[in-house]
Image (spheres, rainbow, N blue to C red):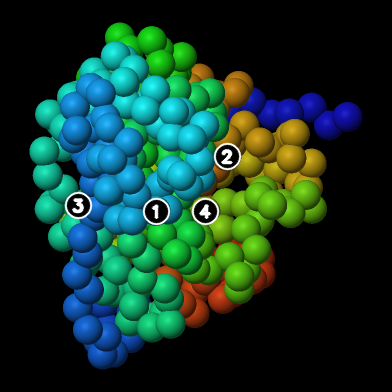
Amino acid sequence: MRAKRRVIFAVAMLTIFAGCGNKRSQDDKVLFGEDKAPKETITIHRFDKALFESGNTPTEQYLLSIEKDFKPMFAANLSDKQYMQVVKAFVQDKQMQSVHKTVVSMYPDLKWLEDDLAKAMSKIRQIRPDSTKTNIYTLILGPAEYSFAYQNRILVYPEYSAISIDLYSMDSLSDNPYYKTMPEYLRASLKKENIAPDYVRTYLQEITFRDIPLSFQNPEATLLDCIIDDGKYSYAVAALLPEYGLNTIFRYTPAQQQWVEANEYNIWTYIIQNQLLYCKDRTKYLSLIAEGPSTKGINNSPARIGNYIGYKIVCEYMDKNPITLDSLFKIDKSEQILKASGYKPKKTTK
């Protein structure tokens, strides 16, 4: 077996604005086409507030009165007496009442989020005029196994979307027994500023996967396939939410973002020298794209560093090929994007 070569990763925290960084060479007209779609307006429906508004002992009459406005948020009809009791018990739970107070304190209103999403959705509508406009709800997810909760923190369906807003209140819920099992590395990416990028990414995945199935769903996908897929979404989110920093889009701390920027050459060298780029054995490259406190075997690294490389490749491709985001998503050959990008990161010095 070929021995893996070791790569020394620079520890220096240098902020390198190479390639597209937080900027794009194309203007909106190139990326999104002619601005013919009407400006989007978004209203977020606060199910998290409505459910607890009746106080600690909600009446059946009150719950039935809100069922019509929040129908998608109920798992069954409230006419089902057994389910009604489940809902009442949820609202009467003292820990959930505490969570509700925390959430309302952190998010008294969501106009800022409505405005940010409206801008992004207006641009999406330019490239996908047939994309479905869904009602957006916020809810309190409550007790759940942490990996399930994290993976389902935002759900987008053709009929509605749901944001588990309690999960974006983790800084204030660390002592709540229902949330104590959430690892610190996930808590760090569940902040107020992560809501809009997470929502836009999830929405894009919903409207594009019909054209191009996500690579991580294909057991034969190579590392290149997976990181190019992810890179497309990161590039699109950065374009749709230009006021958000890259570290927020990647769910990194500023220090972690500096690390991947300073070590881009070394990450790429590690991938190439260990023959991982075209590897189809996911067990060998999963650590480069999976959630975690760090990337296994690479000192001082954050998680998902392979996805950052995918983003940089897409950046280089888009710099050289002025096409719309819709056209980018329709390219189903990752090798085509890599070759046309001419991607070759420069070695940096400390």
Q: Nearer the viewer, residue 294 or 274?
A: 294
Q: Are marks 2 and 1 in contact (CB under 8 Å)?
A: no
Residue shown at 38%/83% (left/top)?
A: 129
SS state under label 1: helix
Distance from disc 1 to disc 3, alpha carbons, whole Å, reads 22 Å
User: Which is more N-terminal, label 3 or label 4?
Assistant: 3
Q: Amino acid at mark 2?
A: Ile
The image's mark for residue 122 is none
The image's mark for residue 230 is 4
Distance from disc 4 to disc 3, alpha carbons, whole Å, reads 24 Å
Q: Nearer the viewer, residue 298 or 251?
A: 251
What is the crowding at mark 3: few (fewer than 14 residues within 10 Å), some, or many (at least 20)?
some
Distance from disc 2 to disc 1, alpha carbons, whole Å, reads 36 Å
Residue shown at 60%/21% (left/top)?
A: 297
The image's mark for residue 289 is 2
Residue 87: horizontal and vertical position, in percent?
Answer: 40, 31
**Residue 171 seen in the current view:** no
The residue identified by callout 1 is: 71
Q: Nearer the viewer, residue 94 or 157?
A: 94
SS state under label 4: helix
SS state under label 2: loop
Q: Are marks 4 and 2 in contact (CB under 8 Å)?
A: yes
The image quadrant of residue 6 is top right
**Quarter placement of the C terminus:** top left
Distance from disc 4 to disc 2, alpha carbons, whole Å, reads 9 Å
Frontmost of labels 1 and 3 is: 1
Q: Amino acid at mark 3?
A: Leu
User: Which is more N-terminal, label 2 or label 4?
Assistant: 4
User: Which is more N-terminal, label 2 or label 3?
Assistant: 3
